[in-house]
Amino acid sequence: MSAFTVFTNKLHSCLSDSEDPYECAEHVARHLSELLKTPEFLEDVYREGCPDEPKANLVYVSPKGMFSVVAFVWQPGQATCIHDHVCWCVVGVLEGQEEETAYRIMTDGEGEKWLEPTQKINITPGHVCKLVPPGEDIHQVRNAGTETAISIHVYGTDIGKRGTSINRRFDNLPIKTGLEGTPLNWRDLDLGADTGIHLS
């Protein structure tokens, strides 16, 4: 049995037993960490990139739509829009180096809104991170290296039907640092629709 089949079988088992998104993401993160130790599991057809933007290759969707596995392929310098997600997501880097910048939405007393960077981390092969809405999961990811980067994303829904993992994009807001302001519960705001990277 292939390493990827073992991985998806484990996810079917653990996700069938839980509906809590934090618990689901924790289970997936543990199993994805193990899968990344055998990078040859990803077939060549899912390693194909695009010269214009990061390419999202749909690798697997569970028969019941409980989860999807997507391989993102990034050429040097390519980046996502600033976005959030439609559901919980677990990401692990397979090859290359990625940089993730997290943001929060701020406002002042006059109603102006802006994005404030809260964290920037370099993600290398084997690193796994979890994102669970409605927590602050606004971020942007880019290839921070000089070679192709590949990351494996597991989403808690049928991404094949949706065509994208992005809930909203936030490129219309300015990025500012060091200003006095109040964090916003941004999911209650009308900030635009999904117009992000779509699956191949």
Image (cartoon, grey):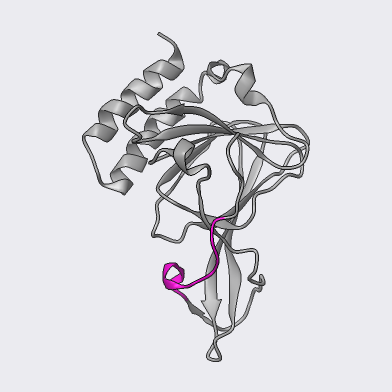
Which residue is more in the foreground, 177 or 50?
50
Q: Is residue 154 visible?
A: no
Give residue 71's position: percent from left, percent from top: 56, 31
Residue 83 lies, with reference to residue 44, above or below; the image says below
Give residue 50's position: percent from left, percent from top: 73, 34
Is 187 a magenta residue? yes
Give residue 49's position: percent from left, percent from top: 70, 31
Residue segment shown in magenta: 184-194
In screen coordinates, is 72 left or right of 28?
right
- Image quadrant in which you'd find residue 8: top left
Q: Residue at x 50, y 46 (%)?
A: 165
Q: Residue at x 32, y 24 (%)?
A: 10
Residue 83 lies, with reference to residue 23, above or below; the image says below
In screen coordinates, is 78 left or right of 94?
right
The quadrant in which the N terminus is found is: top left
Check the image and name the residue furthest to the top. Answer: 1
Give residue 3's position: percent from left, percent from top: 44, 15
Q: Is residue 128 visible?
A: yes
